[in-house]
Amino acid sequence: MDTQENTGGVNSYMGILRRRRVYVGTIAPLITFAAIYLAFTLPPEYQSTATILIEPSVVNKDVVAPTVASYSNQQIEIVEGRVLKLDTLKALVKSYDPYPEDKTMDLTQKAQRVLQSTTLERVDPVTMKPDQDANAFSLHYNNPDPERASETAKRLAQAFLTYNQRSREQAAQDATLFLKQQAEAVSQQMREIDEEINKFKNAHGDALPEDMARNEAAIDRDQHDLDSLQQEILRVQEKEGLLSVELSQISPNMISQAGDLTDVATVRTKLAEAEQRYTPDHPEVKRLKRALQDLMAAQGTATKGGIVSNANNPQYLSTASELQSARKELDSLHGQADRLRGEINKYEELLRRTPGVEREYSDITRRRQSAQTAYAQIQDKLQHAQLAESFESEEQGEKFVLLRAPIPAKLPVYPNRIGLILLGFILGGALAAIAVAIAESADSTVRSVRDFPEAEDAPILASIPQIDNSSDRRRNRLRFATWVAAYTAAVLVIGVAVVSGLKSTTTTPVAQTQAQ
């Protein structure tokens, strides 16, 4: 029973295919042939890929500190934005035209097409699989010619390498130049402060804080000298007083007169005794006064200081000479004392001015020290920057390295011929099945006992199968011949398209080589 039902079901499906062979024989092959035709007639695009690695510095950053910041997660995007722009691509197209056969596009349009045909993808440097956190990327470029695709991808990769290295060198040079300018600015500031310090010193002389200890020492020294001079002055003054007294008791001249009134000293002594003993009007007092006046008139006129100028008494002259020497020495000592007092007053005035001067001077020196510290720091950074600049120029820092060079592709990346053919085959079969199902559901023709509705009062006794006559057979043969001819023509057209597509794939590199 099951075998009969299964056999009937298969026969039923086969009957449907025979009845709807027009749909099955036209829709599915037509779409399949169209897909094959498109797969080999669409303009092919060949993809060439260059893989670039961000290689870290060969020297530890503790040995040579770079002046160029490295951010692997952003560096690729930054370089991509600098290289893949119209100005850069125009220069590339000008040096090597990826589309020489297209005469309708100008330089800008070709550069725009290169930009649209180029893509970047972060990949693992070992497995080459996409990885957004990897430090390598693949540069894909599509072109109808595999050789041009390879050459253009190579030039784009070189542009990436060149720009990255040039940008790092330029950044290192800019850092060095900036530090040089900063060092020169601070140096100029230091020179201005030094000039300000010189003017300040000239204006305030020895009242500077740095001279305070010297001024105090000078005051102590001068005060000590002044104290010594004071002792010496007292000694000389005492000597002068003694000499003056002694001189006043010596007669300036050697006078020979009668009586006892022969010299001034004797007369003065007697006059003093008489004035103590008698009244001023006493004859003895008057006589002694007249005698003293006569002696004084006879001896000459005294000079300044009580020394007679025309004295001839050797003892008087000797004492007078000693008195004059004592007075000269005393004048010299007084002059020295006055000079020391003036020096002490000057130093004391400088010390009084020092606190006010110190505040201004401290501010200036503080600015000078700050500038000196900043200059030393900048010089240290400048040395590191110059070393880093040399380091970058010798390509010892972080750099882009071509991990895999682009090569000409053997198969086009577009269109996907196998995928397109399979898609056409599946789509054709699906559309044919849908058409058959719609046609069967809309057909009410009774072709077998199973198609006839069963009646309760009139059971089916027998069925008569369809019998083809000669006209039906001729019509079927003509239809079959037409299909064969159509399929043959379609196969021929598709064969020509396939051969043409394969021929263009294999001959393009040769033609490109000859063109170059």
Image (cartoon, rainbow, N blue to C red):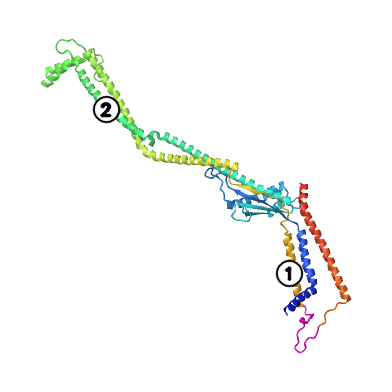
Q: From this viewpoint, which residue is outermost toward the right?
A: 470
SS label for mark 2: helix
Tell me if residue 196 can be seen. Answer: yes
Question: Against 265, is 486 above or below?
Answer: below
Instruction: Classify 10 Å Cα crowding around label 1: few (below 14), some (14-19), many (20 and above).
Output: some
Which residue range is magenta in the image? 443-462
Is any part of residue 300 visible from this angle?
A: no
Q: Does residue 261 show up magenta in the picture?
A: no
Residue 176: image quadrant is top right
Kind of residue sitting beneath label 2: Gln
Q: Which residue position holds label 2?
A: 230
User: Residue placed farthest to the bottom in the image?
Assistant: 457
Task: Tell me the CA gap for discs 1 and 2.
Answer: 136 Å
Q: Which residue is mark 1?
A: 430
Q: Amino acid at mark 1?
A: Ala
Image coordinates of residue 215 in percent, x first then y, are 35, 33
- Residue 232: quadrant of the picture: top left
- Magenta-drawn stretch, dominant element (helix, strand or loop): loop
Label 1: which secondary element: helix
Above or below, comparing residue 242 to residue 224 in the picture: above
